[in-house]
C-alpha cells in the first residue's frame, strides 16, 4: 500500500485537471528504506508527457533527467523511483 504526500497528490491532480482530454504519465518518488513497511510513502511525483505514451526514446531521456536531478539535489540517498504501469 502507498501513501501519497500532499505535494505528490496535488501535483498529480493539477496535471490531470490541466489536461483532462489527454493521458498523462510520469513517475512517483518514494522514501528509500521502506521495504519492510506495510505503507510506503510517496513524497513527490514527476509528470512526463501529456500526449502519446509510446515514445520510448523520450521516456529514457526523461528518466535520465530525473536521475540527474535526484543526484544533483542529493536526494538519491533518500528516494527511490516507482514506475507504475496501468
Image: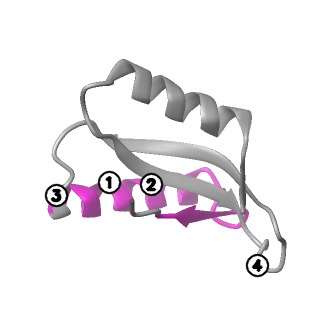
Disc 2 target residue: 66
Closer to the chain start, of discs 3 and 2, is 3
Q: Which mark is residue 52?
A: none
Q: Secondary structure at mark 2?
A: helix
Give the numbered dot on residue 35.
Answer: 4
Q: Is residue 61 magenta?
A: yes
Query: What residue sits right under mark 1 in the picture?
Result: 62
Q: Is residue 48 left or right of residue 70?
A: left
Q: Alpha carbon of mark 3 to alpha carbon of mark 4: how far?
A: 30 Å
**Number of residues whose C-alpha sits closer than 10 Å to that of mark 4, classed few (under 14), some (14–19) or many (20 or more):** few
Closest to the observer: 31 or 2?
2
Mark 3 and mark 1 residues within 8 Å of each other at the beta carbon? no
Where does the magenta region start and end? 57-83
Q: Disc 4 or disc 1, which is closer to the eye?
A: 4
- The tag earlier along the polypeptide, 4 or 1, is 4
Residue 33 is left or right of residue 15, and the answer is right
**Marks 2 and 1, how far apart at CA:** 6 Å
Could you say whether the residue bearing mark 4 is in a helix, strand or loop?
Answer: loop
Q: Nearer the viewer, mark 3 or mark 1?
A: 3
| Residue assigned mark 3 | 54
Q: Determine contact: label 3, label 4, CB under 8 Å.
A: no
Name the residue at 35% across, 47% down.
25
Q: Quadrant of the C terminus?
A: bottom left
Q: Nearer the viewer, mark 2 or mark 4?
A: 4
Q: In 3D space, how far apart are the residues under numbered discs 3 and 2 (Cα atoms)?
A: 19 Å
Residue 39: x %, y % from top left: 80, 63
Report x, y in % for residue 45: 54, 44
* Crowding near the residue tagged with mark 3, few <14, some 14–19, many ≥20 C-alpha atoms within 10 Å: few
Tell me the CA gap for discs 4 and 1: 25 Å
- Position of 35 relative to 43 (above/below): below
Amino acid at each position: 500500500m502507498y501513501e501519497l504526500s500532499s505535494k505528490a497528490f496535488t501535483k498529480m491532480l493539477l496535471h490531470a485537471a490541466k489536461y483532462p482530454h489527454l493521458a498523462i504519465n510520469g513517475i512517483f518518488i518514494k522514501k528509500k528504506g521502506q521495504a519492510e513497511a506495510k505503507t510506503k510513502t510517496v513524497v513527490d511525483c514527476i509528470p512526463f508527457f501529456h500526449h502519446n505514451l509510446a515514445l520510448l526514446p523520450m521516456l529514457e531521456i526523461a528518466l535520465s533527467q530525473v536521475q540527474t536531478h535526484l543526484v544533483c539535489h542529493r536526494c538519491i540517498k533518500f528516494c527511490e523511483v516507482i514506475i507504475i504501469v496501468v
